[in-house]
Amino acid sequence: QVALAESGGGSVQAGGSLRLSCAASGYTFSSQCVAWFRQAPGKEREGVAAIFTEGGSTSYADSVKGRFTISQDNAKNTVSLEMSSLIPEDTAMYYCAAREPFVARSCAESLLRGLGDFVYRGHGTQVTVSS
């Protein structure tokens, strides 16, 4: 049984940093597309960042480019999201999601399409940024 579990959320002041982590059980992140999504109350879900763990290619939403970094740790079977220069607009529930194998789209394309390709999802971790 596959389970993804996010950790590292919390409250921070604008300009601060947080590091989110996604750990998997029953699933290996090796050679997979793994992404972070976020959703704030009353707003649409947004694909924030994705990484294809074979090769490490990454993609980001324009809203977080230059501030967020997605990375993998194969030894720990985790994918992390380092968030810096946080702004109140980053306040949201952040979800980790993993795509099913052998999808005929790039990881970046899957991120743009939303959660549709991502069959495994965690329960989320809350990030709150105060001004």
Image (cartoon, rainbow, N blue to C red):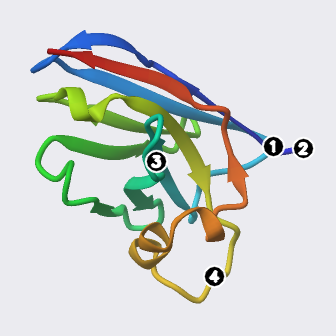
Residue 91 appears at what percent x and percent y?
A: 33, 28
Mark 1 and mark 2 lie on one chain; the one further toward the N terminus is 2
Identify the residue position indicated by label 1 in the image: 26
Identify the residue position indicated by label 2 in the image: 1
Query: How far separated are the C-alphas under marks 2 and 3?
Result: 21 Å
Query: How far separated are the C-alphas under marks 1 and 2?
Result: 5 Å
Residue 66 appears at what percent x and percent y?
A: 11, 48
Answer yes or no: do the residues labelled 1 and 4 have beta carbons within 8 Å?
A: no
Residue 108 appears at what percent x and percent y?
A: 39, 73
Determine the secondary structure under disc 2. loop
Determine the secondary structure under disc 3. strand
Q: Is residue 124 left or right of residue 47?
A: right
Q: Residue at x 47, y 48 (%)?
A: 37
- For the residue pair 72 and 18, the one nearer the viewer reads as 18
Determine the secondary structure under disc 4. loop
Residue 53 appears at what percent x and percent y?
A: 47, 60
Mark 4 surroundings: few (<14), some (14-19) or many (≥20) residues within 10 A:
few
Mark 1 and mark 4 lie on one chain; the one further toward the N terminus is 1
Answer yes or no: do the residues labelled 2 and 4 have beta carbons within 8 Å?
A: no
Is 115 rendered above or below residue 72? below
Q: Is residue 88 left or right of residue 24?
A: left
